[in-house]
Amino acid sequence: MNEREAFPADALNDAGLNRQFVFDLAGLPADMVTKLAPQPGERQLILFGHGGRRLWDCVQAADLPGENPIDDYSTATVERWFAEQLPGHRYRILFPSEHPIGLQALGKLAGWHQPSPIMVGVDKEWGSWYAYRAVAIADTNLAPTTPLTGRSACPTCTGQPCIGACPANALANGEFALDTCSRYRLQPGSACAHGCLARQACPVGSAHRYAPEQIMHSYSRSLAVIRRYYA
Ligand code: SF4
Ligand code: SF4
């Protein structure tokens, strides 16, 4: 391959998609590449994420209609970034979309995902206050990102306050019991209908904790999914 291009991160950082990771397809596990079904010329996968509050502020400022404003904003931001920063390159957005993609598997390869008792990953810097927002496959020749290491907070956590904060005891023994959690959230007047008390009890990355409105938004969406599942 010719000399690699530096990753143009500034516009993404400004727009709240402030975590990015470039994978060479050639360096990914073969079964993962097969599922991605790359087209001729496509040779890189780019993972876009956010950490902290800025993305939500940007989404609010964009004031998009529709049920999925974070997805719509993230897609539009990635499209604009390609057009402005990498003109002439071909890409396809694989997420958000109907394309099945293992975000957590990518997160593990990037060093973003660190297992925790609370189902979501917990990173030393961001705590649980980050998420995967978009994935694109492209014909780019960007410098691949070096995976993060040493980012896990849970093994040295004193007292593991998340576990005791769960009113449903759904994290007993450090294992997440999805059914127990879901049923508790569906109870009338549940304290967890629109937020996870265990997640909020985790002290790691608390400076990046989402605004209450963002927590309400994402947990209302997951509650709707649970309602449909248990209907
Ligand atoms: S409270 Fe401790 S064990 Fe629980 S998620 Fe946070 S760091 Fe991990
Ligand atoms: S949402 Fe509530 S019941 Fe579920 S894990 Fe969090 S604290 Fe426990």
Image: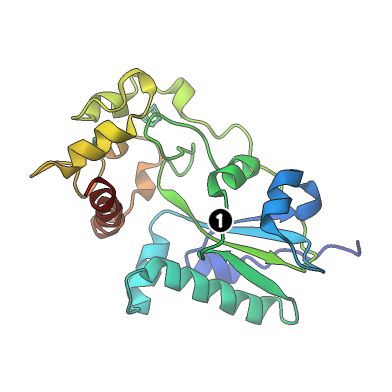
Q: Amino acid at mark 1?
A: Pro
* Residue 72 percent location from the top left of the image: 44, 72
Residue at image point 35% right, 42% down? 206
Name the residue at 35% across, 76% down. Answer: 61
Is the CB atom of the residue marked by disc 1 within 8 angstroms of ligand 2's nearest atom?
A: no
Left or right: residue 49 versus residue 39 is left
Dot 1: within a 10 Å radius of its alpha carbon, few (fewer than 14), some, or many (20 or more) residues? Answer: few
Report helix, strand or loop for mark 1: loop
Task: Judge from the rendering whether residue 173 lies leftward or rightward of residue 75; answer left or right.
Answer: left
**Residue appearing at x 57%, y 79% in the figure:** 80
In this view, 228 is above or below 3: above
**Residue 66: x percent and y percent?**
33, 76
Vertical relation: 168 (above or below) 21: above
Which residue position holds label 1? Answer: 100
Determine the quadrant in which ligand 2 lies.
top left
Q: Residue 67 falls in which quadrant of the image?
A: bottom left
